[in-house]
Image: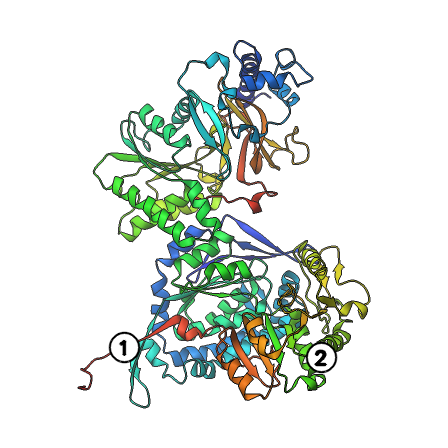
Amino acid sequence: MLDIPVIRWGQPYESLEKDQVVHFETGETLATVHQANGGLVKMDMKKAKRARDVLRQIPIDDLIEMCKKAADHYLNGTLPLGNGTQSPEEFCRMQSATTGLPEHMCASNMKKNSFVLTHMREILDALTRGLPLDILSKGYGFEDRGVTVSYQANAPVLGMVLPSNSPGVHTLWMPVIPLQIGLVLKPGPQEPWTPYRMYEAFAQAGVPREAISIYPGGPEVGAAVLADCERAMIFGGIPTVERYHGNPRVQVHGPGFSKFIFGDDKVDEWEKHVDLMADSVVINSGRSCISCSGIWASRHGAEIADAIAKKIASVAPLPMNDPKAPLAAFTVPGVAKAINDQIEEKLKIPGVTEVTAKYRDGSRLVEHERCDYLRPTVLHCTDPDHPLANTEYMFPFVTVVDCPEKKMLSSIGTTLVCSAITENPDLSQQLLDATNIDRLNIGVVRTIALNWMQPHEGNIIDFLFRARAFQNSPPPAH
Amino acid sequence: MTTNLDTLCTAAKEKLDAHTREMVAWHFHPSTGSPFWLEKAATFKFDPLKEVNCFDDLKKFPLFEDDWLRGGPVRRWLPKGLEGKPLYVFETGGTTGIPKSRLVAEDHWTDYEIFSDTLPDESFPKGTDWLMLGPSGPRRLRLAVEHLAQYRGGIAFCVDLDPRWVVKLLKKGDIKGMEAYRDHVIDQALTVLSAGHNIQSMFTTPKLLEALAMRLMDDGSSVEEAGIKGIFCGGTEFTQQWYRFAREELLGPNVYITPTYGNTLMGLACGKPFDPADNYKITYFAPQPRATIEVANFKDTNQVVDYGQTGRVKLYTLTKELFIPGFLERDEGEREKPHEKYPWDGISGVRPFHEIAKTTTVGVY
């Protein structure tokens, strides 16, 4: 059995408190993970500056090359992990066994992480809008057009309070190391695998170990990471989002409420896009914040819902190692049932109909001895203000909402990804101006089709660096 | 073969049984008992005065419900035998709602005098002064620590702390407000420590000690350089790992820290003396016979679990001021074997009871 220590600026630390990470189906303990305490984090953060110092000794260009090597180690290598090793196949099996995500989805997430690491130069070029990267290192420099620019790091390290149930989020912190910013990772209790594997991949590629800390632990540890890192990211539900909203030190990632909207000019062609919508709902078991949870149209709502329901209602659990397994398991007892009960309760409020029920063999909730599943659910909603009109759950769940085009943007609420099927210039402009939408796709694009060259919920460059004035000679007379 | 420890345990058990008889006689005799227990006795199907003859007979009583302590009139808890004594009322447990109150005459002095005898003089030098950095207001800690200082010939310098306010801040997610309040408390502590007094001992909580030590480090100093030689510190946050962290990284080898576990109902359970062989395992022993801790089976709380097994903390308080014939605390832990210094059962690994841990805000100060 693996025994995984805390990592304090590259040094393993054996805690007197350990947590067991267990296989959700068999109950087998896969690893014991040493638990940090909050004070440990606070103590180490006094030395956070050193993490950036050691990284700044390596040119950003070299760190980008190390990212490419790290991608290969991460994707293909058998890497040290605690008192043992872990191959890519073992990684997928273990991640699946503790998060409930089917193995093929874990493998797919690995490829995604590897892609981001491999294409780091292009990604940084895109996120910095072509800024010479040594400016971030030196603090100032000159653009090609001769303009002086200066950027100052807001923090020597980025703290990450990571989730347990969504291995896809790790791409967000991959660019941090080549930006010469240290990493402080607090893994989700069921997903220690990616942080440790990525740490080891970076180290094998030549990144100094002392630039990274990993602190498994309870809520107190997460609180310490957020309190003591000048910049941090956290993942959570709506209460977490509300708690940190407006806090410039914390970038909070919550539910996405990602959706399609149809312009009146294209809604009559809805049948062409059924596969596009169904894929956006079902892929990655609907677990991503970029998974589609809403489809808004001024007409044909019932038909759209029916067509998608017909397509995905038969999706049912398969073993985790089945390459076609479409559904992730709920591994925390009672969660799936609570969600199911909540949906059933809200379905009693007039204005919404479940469309999948008539096509599904069996109930939405599938209860097993050690885990549960929720099968795809498509609702048709005639009232944009209905509580189920703008809801997101961690399984393939989508509501098709009838809503006049002119009311859509004011009704859809905060939306991480909006794929708008329209060629109407007025609507397109309104979409471009809508501040409640983060990632905007105008055209036939799945909500889950991310372009890594684009910022996600805020540009990480803007989060980690502050553009400011810098002069080393007097300005022109004026 | 009977060992010395066996002999000590037998003697302690006999003492506990005798003390139980004495306390039951006090609390249930009409001339000395409190209105609460005398009225309650009328509802029992047994006569405490005749049928409680040893500690185990206390299991005839129903479990004590701490909600009985909420609201007034608080004098219903006053034993007639103590009428006329100056009284204190202290809040216990919980940080919201109508407080649970306990009436006290001298128990807090007695408890802390007994505790004082367990403290090493080299780390808590007699005649030197104390810093009391913990919850104050209607809690007994302030007065108890002050008495401890006085009992040892010192003076206690106190800093205000209102845990109810901290809970309010946390519940509304006002982290900044909570941090500002913590900083306000630490500011006061630093001011006291820097004012040229002779403070060498301290009571505080793990969170406040962390905050104080970190601030001193930021200022290029340390708890040791601030003059502190000994700290006693309590709460379920005082875990094995935290103990190690405190000794190895927060305080250094020259500052003594000892864990305590207790509350206003029980008094103070002492930690087993530090032994490197224990690997920072923390084992508490109640101040028997005035109070006793059992590690009770989760399903049948009249049964104790086997040594090393996990159970819920069941508390008994047997003083002339308070009679608690079995109360289920909000904590759990492992049953530990007696120690020569404390020849009765102990408990280790104390932590919030798993069934209510998720709904409880712990370690707020």
B172 is higher (above) or lower (below) than B346: below
Compared with residue A340, is residue B116 higher up or lower down, i.e. above or below? above
Dividing the picture into quadrants, the one containing residue B306 is top right
Task: Say if residue A206 shows up in the picture.
Answer: no
* In this rendering, position of residue A101 left or right of residue A315: left
Q: CA distance from mark 1 to mark 2?
A: 54 Å
Q: Position of residue A279 (x, y in %)?
A: 68, 77
Query: Does residue A130 appear to the left or right of B358 in the view shown?
Result: left
Same subunit, labels 1 and 2: the answer reads yes
- Mark 1 burial class by Cα count in 10 Å: few <14, some 14-19, many 20+: few
Chain assignment, label 1: A
Residue A230: % across, % down: 38, 63
Do the residues bearing badges 1 and 2 touch, measured as CB atoms within 8 Å? no
Identify whether B22 is placed above or below A446: above
**Res. B218 visible in picture:** yes
Label 2's element?
A: loop
Q: Residue at x 34, y 38 (%)?
A: B160
In the image, residue B138 lies at what x, y percent? 41, 32
Q: Chain of mark 2?
A: A
Q: Quadrant of the C terminus of chain A?
A: bottom left
Position of the N terminus of chain A by quadrant: bottom right
A339 vs A475: above or below:
above
Q: Nearer the viewer, residue A19 or A401?
A: A401
Look at 76% across and 69% down and name the residue there: A356
Q: Is residue A106 left or right of residue B147?
A: right
Give the secondary structure at mark 1: loop
Kind of residue at badge 1: Ala
- Residue ID for mark 1: A469
Place of residue A43 in the rendered image (x, y in percent of width and height, measured from the top left): 38, 54
The circle on residue A300 is 2
| Label 2 CA crowd tier, 10 Å (few <14, some 14–19, many 20+) | some
